[in-house]
């Protein structure tokens, strides 16, 4: 009987001292520091990683960092967490990727779980409602700012603007599923480039990330490719099989034992599907999650999705960690024979497992072949058109949030062969409108940082709510 190889043995022969001279224990401490500072969404998280890994520690150089980042941008899922897995794997093989990626999400897992418990137990308490009343206004302003920020980067010509408009129309008016929009945008970009259309020709992706340029030759890893990072089909198949089983066996077991109608089965299947279509960042996929979690499964009420996003914005880790709150509330409200809090905890952890396990799979299998992907212009164009479509999807998210933050009543109106959500103007919430306008002024006019806007709006909401005895 053959013995089972440990994961790191699959990756490459173990070595006591890495060639680059960075002890594994030191790497663990550095990744824990990166995780503790990972606020501010992917842009802020990538900047923190660059400052510590490239500028301060000089583990890798600027070119290699951008090389990895461009690859992660091609993948579904949170690019900042995947970048951590990539660099960790590059420095210390499979165990380095596992540690870096796990530590990156661990603070968010703990924080969101604690906040979910508080929300489930004390959500009806006036002080908690007032706090989230302020958070919602800030989150709406931040999502609108994301539309503008991504739009400036992605909408370089009229064709890209048209794609963004078409994506918004498709998801808002026609209720076309998010995965279909992403697939269609990618195909349009790929075919457009093959046809030689100039509108789909994109630049080199990311430019300089930080203030200090560190040449690859001056970094600890140097310019050479480590032995374990070179393409090896047998290695990719082995490690891919391991993580595919880790991801899908729990899903299959739940479907077999509990049935497709069980809330845990629904959570595992839905978020597994989400893990393969989450191109374009957290804000884009949240429109898809909100559409399904609120409208299809009934796990959340519309305003609660905003509450969850507020939690994710104010805690370290990827914004996509809001999905843990979604899974928690879904299982909390349909616990079966379990205690509701236990069911919610299991639902949240299950969501996190099927959301992030594929991220390790994409990196460990695909990273050795990253050069081939980066040199393919058609794939780069597909990414560019997906990003353009994402602008329309994020705009849909902002409109959806605005309807439920600023108005007390939203009605379905038949139009264009479908049902549109239209606000009842007489139900406008003036306090929410005023606070949202103030948050937008702070974000767009005075460029106030995200955490400050969230903190001030939360404080104002708390004071206002306590003064009135509720909101």
Image: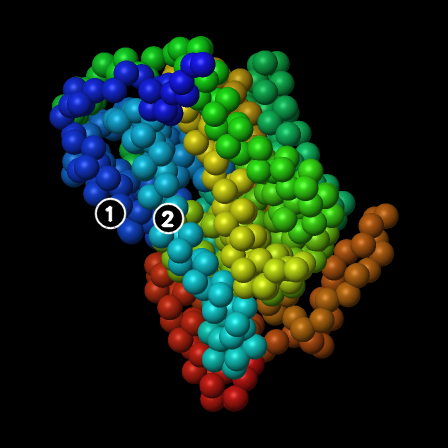
Secondary structure beneath disc 1?
Answer: helix
**Kind of element beneath mark 2:** helix
Find disc 1 in the rendering and name its residue: 33
Q: Quadrant of residue 218?
A: top left
Residue 450, horizontal then vertical, whole percent: 38, 59
Looking at the figure, which quarter contains the C terminus? bottom right
> Quarter of the image holding residue 224?
top left
Mark 2 crowdedness (10 Å alpha carbons): few <14, some 14-19, many ≥20: some
- What residue do we see at 47% from left, 25% from top? 242
Looking at the image, which is closer to me, 208 or 355?
A: 355
Q: Is residue 128 left or right of residue 419?
A: left
What is the image's colouring? rainbow
Residue 326 versus residue 177 in the image, above or below: below
Q: Is residue 149 above or below residue 437?
A: above
Report the residue at 72% width, 52% height from top. 296
Report the Cα–Cα distance between label 1 and label 2: 12 Å
| Residue closer to the observer: 297 or 405 | 297
Q: Which mark is residue 269?
A: none
Q: Name the residue beneath numbered marker 2.
A: 106
Residue shown at 66% from the left, 45% from the top: 265
> Does residue 162 lie above or below 128 as drawn?
above
Specify whether residue 128 is in view.
yes
Q: Locate residue 366: give its quadrant.
A: top left
Question: On the rendered structure, is 48 left or right of 268?
Answer: left
Q: Is residue 369 left or right of residue 353?
A: left
């Amino acid at each position: 009987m053959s013995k089972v190889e440990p994961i790191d043995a699959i990756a490459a022969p173990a070595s006591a001292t890495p060639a680059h001279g960075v002890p594994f224990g030191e790497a663990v401490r550095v990744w824990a520091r990166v995780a503790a500072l990972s606020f501010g969404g992917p842009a802020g998280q990538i900047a923190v990683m660059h400052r510590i890994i490239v500028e301060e520690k000089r583990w890798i150089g600027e070119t290699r960092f951008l090389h990895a980042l461009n690859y992660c941008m091609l993948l579904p899922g949170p690019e900042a967490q995947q970048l951590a897995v990539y660099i960790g794997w590059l420095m210390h093989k499979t165990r380095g990727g596992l540690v870096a990626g796990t530590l990156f999400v661990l603070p968010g897992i703990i924080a969101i779980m604690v906040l979910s418990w508080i929300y489930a137990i004390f959500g009806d308490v006036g002080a908690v409602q007032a706090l989230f009343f302020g958070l919602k206004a800030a989150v709406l302003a931040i999502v609108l700012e994301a539309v503008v920020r991504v739009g400036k980067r992605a909408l370089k010509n009229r064709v890209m603007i048209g794609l963004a408009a078409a994506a918004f129309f498709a998801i808002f008016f026609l209720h076309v599923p998010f995965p279909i929009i992403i697939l269609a945008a990618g195909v349009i970009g790929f075919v457009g480039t093959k046809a030689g259309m100039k509108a789909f020709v994109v630049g080199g992706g990311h430019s300089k990330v930080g203030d200090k340029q560190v040449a690859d030759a001056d970094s600890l890893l140097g310019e050479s490719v480590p032995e374990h990072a070179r393409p090896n089909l047998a290695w990719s198949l082995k490690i891919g099989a391991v993580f595919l089983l880790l991801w899908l066996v729990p899903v299959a077991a739940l479907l077999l034992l509990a049935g497709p109608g069980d809330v845990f089965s629904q959570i595992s299947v839905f978020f597994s599907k989400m893990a393969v279509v989450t191109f374009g960042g957290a804000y884009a996929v949240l429109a898809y999650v909100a559409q399904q979690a609120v409208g299809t499964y009934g796990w959340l009420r519309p305003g609660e999705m905003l509450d969850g996003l507020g939690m994710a914005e104010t805690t370290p880790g990827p914004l996509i960690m809001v999905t843990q709150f979604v899974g928690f509330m879904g299982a909390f409200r349909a616990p079966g024979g379990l205690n509701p809090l236990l069911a919610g905890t299991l639902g949240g952890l299950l969501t996190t497992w099927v959301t992030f396990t594929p991220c390790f799979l994409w990196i460990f299998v695909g990273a050795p072949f990253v050069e081939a992907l980066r040199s393919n212009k058609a794939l780069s164009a597909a990414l560019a058109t997906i990003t353009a479509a994402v602008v329309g999807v994020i705009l849909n998210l902002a409109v959806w949030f605005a309807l439920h933050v600023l108005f007390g009543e939203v009605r379905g109106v038949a139009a264009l062969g479908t049902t549109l959500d239209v606000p009842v103007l007489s139900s406008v919430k003036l306090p929410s409108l005023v606070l949202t306008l103030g948050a937008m002024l702070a974000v767009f006019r005075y460029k106030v940082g995200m955490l400050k806007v969230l903190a001030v709006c939360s404080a104002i909401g708390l004071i206002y709510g306590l003064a009135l005895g509720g909101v």
